[in-house]
Image: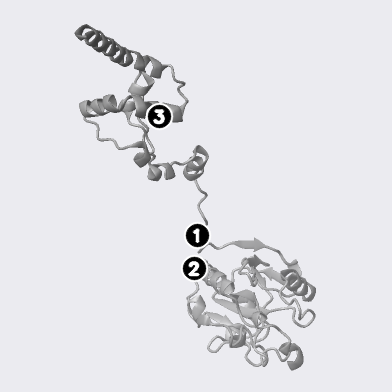
Amino acid sequence: MKIYIGVATGVVGLLVLGFFLYKPVVLRTLPADSGASLASARQNALPTFEKEVKEEEGSTSTSKEETGEISRATELVVEGSTEAVPEKQPVNKEAEDEVVSEDHLDEINEPKEEEAPVDTLKIIDMPLPETSSEPRGQSPVTHIMLHFTSDVIQNPDNPYKVERAHAIFAEYGVGSHYLVARDGTIYRFINESSIAYHAGLGTLAGLPAYTNNMNKYSIGIEILAIGTEAEMSGFIGAGAYGFLPDSAIGYTSAQYDSLRLLLADVAERNVISFDRTHIIGHDDYAPDRKTDPGSLFDWSRVGL
């Protein structure tokens, strides 16, 4: 009886030993991509060994259910691999967001064209016929005279076309040195070296030589604008004036900005005192017949 018990015990021992020697080989033959069966085999066949490996390695990694990853030690045992398996690195979202494409880098590093300064004087030449002026000779330029003009009589719906102002001046043989359009663009009709026919009859107190002779001593600047109803009464009736849009009355900010630069430039080059004695309106010279630039013109916006 004792002999049978001993034989039985020996057989059981061999079976147990064979199981532990054989099971890694079985597990290694499992397909590498068999996730569910692999996990099941690991849980059923290696509970004790996995625990020992984790304890030996001092692993503190959590379960796949908690982290979405399988610990490195378990992966090595289950696959039976001798190669190092790199751990999955967490994604750095902030760093990922900071990645810039090469195209975008080129765009950022591309040199940008510098914008022209706001205070830049730009003038477009649009010469009038010689019948609108004469050579200046040696007469000094001591004054600048401002005017307003428009085509409101013939074209009340579109009174500010530069081409029309130019044509009217050419037709009547008159003109100014400069014209300032509604958008602030400056046009040069006559060179400063010539006397422009812009002032007509008039006088300035204390300067008898200037009586009816202001053209000889001045630079004329026309501004595309329309004055008050009273100031325009010699050109259009009250009914027609009432149909003009508010935006067509008075002066624009762009005109003030350009005119300020033009006045400063002309005054500096011709050594003209920058004050209201030497920079005047047509109505200062001929108040009995002229109303421009009128009461709507704000002299302070050009520094006067």
Q: Considering the numbered disc 3 on the image, is that residue within a helix, a strand or a loop?
A: helix
**Of the residues under marks 1 and 2, which one precedes in the sequence?**
1
Secondary structure under the numbered disc 1 in the rendered image: loop
The structure's colour scheme is: one colour
Name the quadrant containing residue 13: top left
Check residue 268 in the rendering and tell me which mark sits there, or answer none: 2
Label 3: how many Cα within 10 Å (few below 14, some 14–19, many 20+): few
Q: Residues within 10 Å of mark 1 (few under 14, many from 20)?
A: few
Location of residue 38 in the rendering, given as x and y in whole percent from the top left corner:
42, 26
Query: What residue is rendered at 45% in x and 30% in y?
Result: 36
Instruction: Describe residue 246's horizontal placement relative to residue 68 as left or right.
Output: right
Q: Which mark is residue 40?
A: 3
The tag earlier along the polypeptide, 3 or 2, is 3
Does residue 140 appear in this view?
no
Q: Is residue 10 above or below residue 61?
A: above
Which residue matches tag 1? 117
Closer-to-camera residue (172/120): 120
The answer to which of 50 and 237 lies nearer the viewer is: 50
Amino acid at pointer 2: Glu
Disc 3 from disc 2: Cα separation: 95 Å
Instruction: Decide which of tag 3 and tag 1 comes sooner along the chain.
Output: 3
Q: Nearer the viewer, residue 177 or 3?
A: 3
Find residue 261 and name its label. Answer: none
What residue is at 29 percent from the left and 27 percent from the top? 50
Q: Residue at x 56, y 72 (%)?
A: 259
Rendered residue at 28%/13% (across/down): 12
